[in-house]
Image: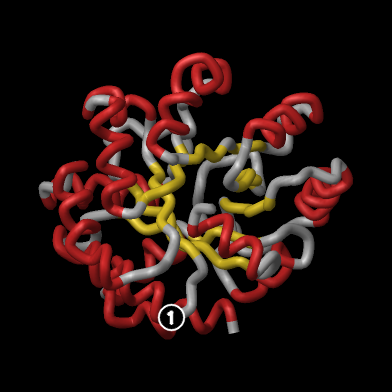
Amino acid sequence: MSKLNQLFKEKPNRLCSVYFTSGYPKLNDTATVVKNLEAAGVDFLEVGFPYSDPMADGPTIQESSSVALKNGVNLDIIFDQLAAIKEQINIPLVGMGYLNQMLRYGTEKFCEKCISVGIETLILPDMPMIEYETIYKDLFAKYGLTNVFLITPQTSEERIKKIDEMTNAFIYVVASSSITGAKGTISEEQIAYFNRIKSYNLKSTLIAGFGISSKETFNTVCSHVNGAIIGSAFVKHVGTNGVDTIDAFVKNIIN
């Protein structure tokens, strides 16, 4: 059983995940960010692989990726940074990047590296489901990797149920038809969307992202799905305040 699924078994609700951009705000901050987030009580992490041509990242994460790339970060550096702290952390790690990054790096090498540094789950938003089924599913299984699919308010019930059948990690519930970024509140329309997804009685853990930026939005989302991912609000915080203030940021949201 993966660390992530063990976590879901032990803690089925109020799961807090944080997305961070590797190599940001400074090239060598990755290890400190991981260790500080784990110490602050975050349940699992999304390790962001900076990419110059993202699909859904809003301006905050786009800017952080641009800075990280200018800092000189790349996949080899990220893997080396994570390998250096692998024995010092226990928190589940989810790799968040793009299919093109994996293809350019070399698919087998990418999978092997992810597992070797403790990344057991991947989110690759630009990977079509049919390609996962026909090309990558067996490869991921070979290396013990699990894959996460995203759903949005426009995703059909049929597709959601198919994703549920194929998923052995969690379903990423995109909370709005928009790019990432703090929105301030969770609307009644979004709550109706969460409740519609829950009514399908899916087997998968449901983790919502996009627009979760405060204690209020975190609590609201967690009352309807299993947990929430904080992305842009955290990236903006560390960019402004530095990595030594992570504990206060996290505890202000989850406590």
Residue sitting at x 37%, y 58%: 20
Q: Which residue is mark 1?
A: 40
- Point out the residue furthest to the left here: 72
Q: Judge from the rendering whether residue 98 lies leftward or rightward of residue 179; answer left or right.
A: left
Instruction: Using the image as rendered, state which of residue 3 and residue 215 is in the foreground.
Output: 3
Across and down, in percent, residue 157 comes to 81, 30
Q: Quadrant of residue 113?
A: top left
Which quadrant holds the C terminus? Answer: bottom right
Compared with 43, 231 (above or below) is: above
- Identified at 32% across, 31% down, the residue is 53
Query: Looking at the image, how many numbered discs can be counted on the residues?
Result: 1
Q: Is residue 58 above or below residue 254?
A: above
Residue 38 screen position, x and y as percent: 40, 74
Image: 248 above or below 162 = below
- Report whether residue 217 is seen: no
* Label 1 Cα neighbours within 10 Å, binned few <14 / some 14-19 / many ≥20: some
Give the x, y percent position of residue 172.
60, 45
- Image quadrant in which you'd find residue 151: top right
Q: Nearer the viewer, residue 235 or 45?
A: 45
Tell me if 91 is positioned left or right of 16 in this view.
left
Q: Is residue 148 visible?
A: yes
Which image quadrant for residue 14?
A: bottom right
Mark 1: amino acid? Ala
Q: Residue at x 51, y 68 (%)?
A: 43
Whole-percent x, y for residue 114 in the image: 31, 44
